[in-house]
Amino acid sequence: MSNVSMIEQRARALDEARKVRLVKSEEIDTEKYLKANDVTHKVHEAKVWLEELQEELVHPPEHVKAVTLPWPKTHAGFAFRPGEVTLYAGSNGGGKSLITGQVALGLIKQRQRVCIASFEMKPKRTLYRMLRQFSGENIEHPRYMDKATYVGRLLERFTGYSNERLWLYDQQGTTSSQQVIAMARYCAVELGVQHVFIDSLMKCVAGEDDYNAQKYFVDELTAVARDHQIHVHLIHHIRKLASEELQPNKNDIKGTGAIADQVDNVLLMWRNKKKEHEVQNGSMPDSSKPDAMLMCEKQRNGEAEDWYSLWYDRDSQQFVETSGAVAMSFDDRGSF
């Protein structure tokens, strides 16, 4: 069999695998999954909880390894807990989608099941970015072999890495909050998904100034997270600041201030625009200064609220921990 026909067969097989991972809105029974769990199962006598508490006090549960961000420097200070909502906020073009794509890859490495619902990018574009981050290099310019062979190997490795652990919700543009809530419940109940990424909040409500709708939507997301013990990752925007070089805080989050109060964790993304402008102007910026900051502004059930410096690796589109660091490896199997 020729190399060309082998590649064509592999591509067809991978196309079929990718179809399995797509979740389409018409597949979801919205009415069924809009309904919260039956309230009769939530009301118990105190003795039920006391019995559980006694068991935990006498026989403490074994330590469960924390689910973390992909950067080791963050592991001591931040963790993703079941039943919580994390809000990622930053400016337009601030790197939120790149950060969350890398976070999703890191979750898969920890054997977590992930669904990404991007209402701003088609699944194919989302997968392209994740493939590039997964490869650790610029997949448009493979260095070691012809492009067809390289892409075939890369897709084969990525399919094995993400098999039964990555789904993508196939809908773009503005949607309804009810449809998104139903999608999240469907993913938890039918697919066993543990992490749902929603990009972005403003695509799920009618208008930027409809604060009641925003509050209702986030409140419903927190209920879904608690009911099904999943973690919801919600991407959002900040207001336009007086200068793009200013570092935001949680008071700069767009929309109602109740959003930051409702969610469990707030991570702000800031890009070092001053450094970027120096590069564009032909200057040699201080490489010790970070390209971006990931700022934990709230962690309800954790102790630390730290800021983490990150550097951008242009080839892989990853954020790395130190200046000049190599891109992180996800499947630990070496180069392609």
Image: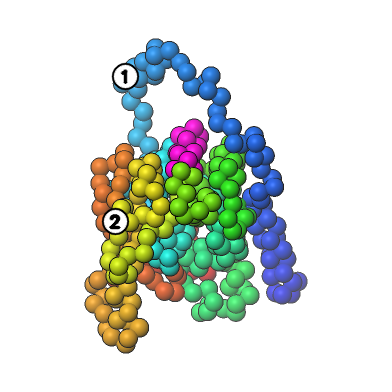
Q: Secondary structure at mark 1?
A: helix
C-alpha span from label 2 to label 1: 43 Å
Quadrant location of residue 171? Answer: bottom right
Eyeballing the image, is 291 above or below 66?
Answer: below
Task: Tell me, for residue 249, which label it has, or none.
Answer: 2
User: Does 156 lie within the magenta span?
Assistant: no
Label 1 belongs to which residue? 58
**Which mark is nearer the camera, 2 or 1?**
2
Question: Residue 210, position in %: x, y?
Answer: 47, 49
Q: Residues within 10 Å of mark 2 (few under 14, many from 20)?
A: some
**Magenta stretch, overall SS:** helix
Left or right placement of residue 264 versus residue 160 in this view: left
Question: Residue 237, position in %: x, y?
Answer: 41, 58
Eyeballing the image, is 157 above or below 3?
Answer: above
Q: Secondary structure at mark 2?
A: loop
Which of marks 1 and 2 precedes in the sequence?
1
Q: Which residues are magenta?
A: 215-230
Question: Residue 154, position in %: x, y?
Answer: 57, 66
The answer, for residue 80, to whether it is visible in the render is no
Left or right placement of residue 171 versus residue 253 in this view: right
Amino acid at pointer 1: Val
**Residue at the (28%, 63%) spot, across then down:** 247
Question: Residue 194, position in %: x, y?
Answer: 50, 42
**Residue at the (39%, 63%) spot, across then down:** 91
